[in-house]
Image (tube, rainbow, N blue to C red):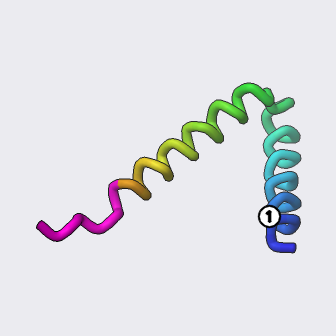
Amino acid sequence: MQRQLQREAIDGYIATAEAEHGPVDPAEVAARAERVRAHHAAHRSNSAPAEAA
């Protein structure tokens, strides 16, 4: 249910952006989503506790 609500919110943001700036390019969206995923993955790996030596 939560994912459905998130998807509906994202759809709303996309509709607003398209109304203000024109159609959204799916390739650009995919590229930006990948950059966000990579950013979060990098920060997750950096936030892991260091092993005790």
x, y percent for residue 12:
86, 55
Give the SS element for disc 1. Answer: helix
- Quadrant location of the C terminus in the rendered image: bottom left
x, y percent for residue 29:
72, 35
The type of residue carrying mark 1 is Gln
- Quadrant location of the N terminus in the rendered image: bottom right
Query: Which residue is the extreme one toward the left?
Result: 53
* Vertical position of residue 4 compared to residue 36: above or below: below
Residue 35 covered by magenta stretch: no
Q: Mark 1 points at which residue?
A: 6
Quarter holding residue 23: top right
Q: Is the magenta stretch mostly helix, strand or loop?
A: loop
How many numbered marks appear?
Answer: 1
Query: Which residue is the extreme one toward the front?
Result: 53
| Relative horizontal placement of residue 41, taking residue 27 as reference (left or right) | left
Q: Residue at x 16, y 70 (%)?
A: 52
Q: Residue at x 80, y 55 (%)?
A: 10
Q: Residue at x 48, y 46 (%)?
A: 39
| Relative horizontal placement of residue 15, taking residue 45 as reference (left or right) | right
Q: Residue at x 79, y 43 (%)?
A: 17
Residue 49 covered by magenta stretch: yes
Q: Nearer the viewer, residue 33 or 25?
A: 33
x, y percent for residue 48:
34, 64
What is the crowding at mark 1: few (fewer than 14 residues within 10 Å), some, or many (at least 20)? few
Residue extent of the magenta highlight: 46-53
* Vertical position of residue 53 compared to residue 23: above or below: below
Query: Which residue is the extreme one toward the bottom?
Result: 1
